[in-house]
Amino acid sequence: MTDMKLQPKNVVVLGATGSIGCSTLDVIAGCSDYLRVVGLSGHTNVELLQQQAQQCQCSHVVITDAKRAELFDRSVLSGGVELGVGPAAIESLVSRDEVDVVVTGIVGSAGLRGTWAALQAGKTVALANKETLVMAGAQVMELSRERNAPIIPVDSEHSAIFQALQSGRGEEVSRLILTASGGPFRDYSTEQLASVSVQDALAHPTWDMGPKITVDSATMMNKALEIIEARWLFDLPVDQIDVVVHPQSIVHSLVEFVDGSVLAQMGVADMKLPIQYALSYPNRWQGPAAKLDFTVPFNCEFFPPDYERFPALLLGREVAGRGGTCGAVLNAANESAVARFLAGTLQFTEIVPACRAVLEHHDFDPTPSLDQLLTIDTWAREELECWKT
């Protein structure tokens, strides 16, 4: 049989200047026989976006912040490169005929519209924006099915589950087990948590992430959001989704099958591996991700989570069980609460109670439209801003 070289996949990277975006570009550079960048988007870091556009020699660049776009040096772009400005330019970019895969690395609810537009256009989405499924899981998964547009998870935990699920049929799954590092405060007492500072919360022991995600890890709200994401992504009820604390972050998640077999996906704590798998699926390639060194001893420990000290986990389970508008409210309230914590107007231990208060105060709708979800997202942010002020 003739060894035919595959055409490279054309990739758009949304949120290219963030940690996921930068890692994605490293993966693409390390797999240049298989992948090619055709478009990048950034929000405010125009200097880095300029460098990336030069290095990638992509054909499309989008800056979503109109004021920051005025600072972009168009002279760094070669002839024929299009520069788009504003959120609408992202929707246009991901819908282009030549695009094969869209990596959604925009943090927060801002990533929903780009993901939605990519799915509507029938593109494969490498989903790194968990808020998309937290806010609109039912709607997004329905759109994915209607448009025959695959969603491949990039979150290390959901990528691990996605990989392990290749070893069995859906009806053979007993439960999904998400691993959590436990963040920097996994051994803190309730009294110690009450005095946590912003600097303390940003000192994650394992992962190098942005401030918002790092705080989410400290409160374990990230795991609450991942429970909701897993419920929609893998179409399982919340009582089949569990969490275990694994401080070493070597096992990225596990799947237990009905016969008692448990399959785990292991790897170095490096986002390049799940990013590359999302881009290579259903194949595997050599790439730039680091590999585990089995010549050096290491331990893998597992502990049950403490729901009393980290109440975000219970909140996440409740929201995953109810569905409807709950996910959008929780996500928006949490983003606003984390912003207030980072600004010094909310204590660390007030983040989850504030989110619960807004959630309990909202008008629940079990089957909202996308426009309703976006409206209630705005409402929840405003409610959280007024909480105890």
Image (tube, grey):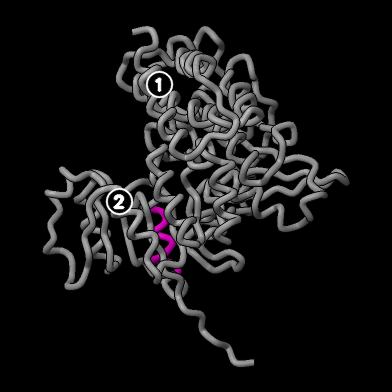
Residue drawn at 23 percent across, 57 percent down: 84
Residue drawn at 63 percent across, 54 percent down: 295
Q: Residues within 10 Å of mark 2 (few under 14, many from 20)?
A: some
| Front in this rendered view, residue 194 or 69 | 69
Quadrant (top left/top right/bottom left/bottom right) for the N terminus: bottom right
Main SS category, magenta section: helix
In-image side of 98 versus 137 (left or right): left
Quadrant (top left/top right/bottom left/bottom right) for the C terminus: top left
Magenta residues span 22-31
Which residue does the numbered mark 1 point to in the structure image?
A: 337
In-image side of 363 versus 172 (left or right): left
Residue farthest along the right direction in this orientation: 259
| Front in this rendered view, residue 379 or 151 | 379
In-image side of 11 versus 301 (left or right): left
Three-letter code for the amino acid on which mark 1 is drawn: Ala
Q: Is residue 68 magenta?
A: no
| Front in this rendered view, residue 291 or 386 | 386
Q: Residues within 10 Å of mark 1 (few under 14, many from 20)?
A: many
Q: Quadrant of residue 301?
A: top right
Residue farthest along the bottom direction in this orientation: 2
Which residue does the numbered mark 2 point to in the structure image?
A: 88
**Which tag is nearer the camera, tag 1 or tag 2?**
2
Three-letter code for the amino acid on which mark 2 is drawn: Ala
In percent of width and height, residue 222 lies at 52, 32
Element assignment for label 1: helix
- The tag earlier along the polypeptide, 1 or 2, is 2
Q: Quadrant of residue 224?
A: top right
In percent of width and height, residue 255 lies at 73, 45
Q: Is residue 179 visible?
A: yes
Element assignment for label 2: helix
